[in-house]
């Protein structure tokens, strides 16, 4: 299998995972510090999704650290399949695409990229509604609309980092 920028067990892969954890954590922190976020389901979903993203990325970050410390190769097709499943595949139509290279056990893993994107998009929709459509932010100055937007922006950055990682994993899997 080819070594690509961001592949598992490399410094660039470790940096991707650190970025994913950092931006997801920042998104949670900013949202938790915003007044009134818990009244809106999309914002609560964003926090749950970012927490799941942190758990997944931190686990892979630890695996990358282990591989770098002990000079292990993480380009095993089974491991790369696990990374692909964990980063991307959550809906049934993608299971069919991935079923040729993955075991039933691997298909059961929760996928974070789709959840992260869905949470960021739904939260962004609520924020746009508040700011531009119904002008809640002007009517109720207690709402932390700016904080909501910053948190959502960090969630989108997290998703971009996960998407980069996922594309690298697909490339490695396809080229192996």
Image (cartoon, rainbow, N blue to C red):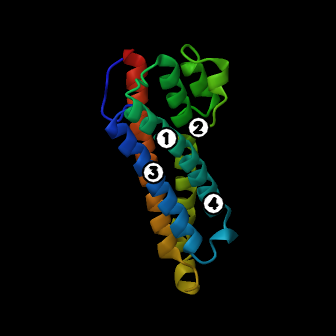
Residue at the image position 63 percent from the left and 55 percent from the top: 48
- Return the residue at label 3: 158
Q: Residues within 10 Å of mark 1 (few under 14, many from 20)?
A: some
Tag 2 and tag 3, C-beta contact below 8 Å: no
Residue, x 48% and y 24% (percent of image)? 80
**Residue found 39% across the figure and 35% down from its top:** 69
Q: Position of residue 29 (x, y in %)?
A: 53, 66
Measured along the vertical axis of the image, is residue 40 above or below residue 53? Answer: below
Mark 4 and mark 3: Cα distance apart in space: 17 Å
SS assignment at label 2: loop
Label 4: element kind: helix
Q: Nearer the viewer, mark 1 or mark 3?
A: 1
Quadrant of the image occupied by residue 95: top right
Q: Nearer the viewer, mark 1 or mark 2?
A: 1
Q: Earlier in the sequence, mark 1 or mark 2?
A: 1
Identified at 50% across, 30% down, the residue is: 83
**Of pointers 4 and 3, the one earlier in the residue sequence:** 4
Mark 1 touches mark 2? (CB < 8 Å): no
* Mark 4 or mark 3, whichever is nearer to me: 3
Q: Which residue is mark 1?
A: 62
Q: In this picture, is 164 found above or below 175?
A: below
**What is the distance, in whole Å, between disc 1 and disc 4 at their CAs?**
30 Å
Using the image as rendered, state which of residue 138 and residue 51 is in the foreground.
51
Tag 1–tag 4 contact (CB < 8 Å): no
Q: Quadrant of the N terminus?
A: top left
Q: Which residue is mark 2?
A: 111
**Mark 4 or 2, nearer chain start:** 4
Q: Is residue 94 above or below residue 119?
A: above
Badge 1 element: helix
- What residue is shown with label 4? 42
């Amino acid at each position: 299998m080819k070594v690509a920028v961001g592949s598992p067990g490399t410094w660039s892969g470790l940096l991707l995972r650190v970025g994913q954890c950092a931006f997801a954590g920042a998104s949670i922190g900013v949202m938790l510090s915003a007044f009134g976020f818990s009244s809106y389901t999309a914002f609560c979903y964003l926090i749950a999704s970012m927490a799941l993203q942190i758990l997944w990325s931190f686990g892979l970050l630890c695996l990358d650290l282990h591989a770098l410390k002990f000079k292990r190769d993480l380009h095993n097709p089974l491991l790369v399949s696990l990374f692909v499943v964990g980063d991307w595949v959550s809906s049934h139509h993608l299971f069919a695409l991935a079923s040729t290279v993955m075991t039933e056990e691997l298909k059961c893993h929760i996928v974070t990229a789709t959840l992260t994107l869905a949470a960021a998009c739904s939260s962004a929709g609520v924020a746009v509604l508040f700011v531009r459509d119904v002008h809640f932010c002007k009517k109720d100055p207690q709402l932390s609309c700016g904080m909501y937007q910053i948190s959502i922006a960090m969630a989108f950055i997290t998703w971009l980092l996960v998407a980069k990682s996922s594309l690298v994993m697909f490339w490695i899997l396809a080229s192996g």
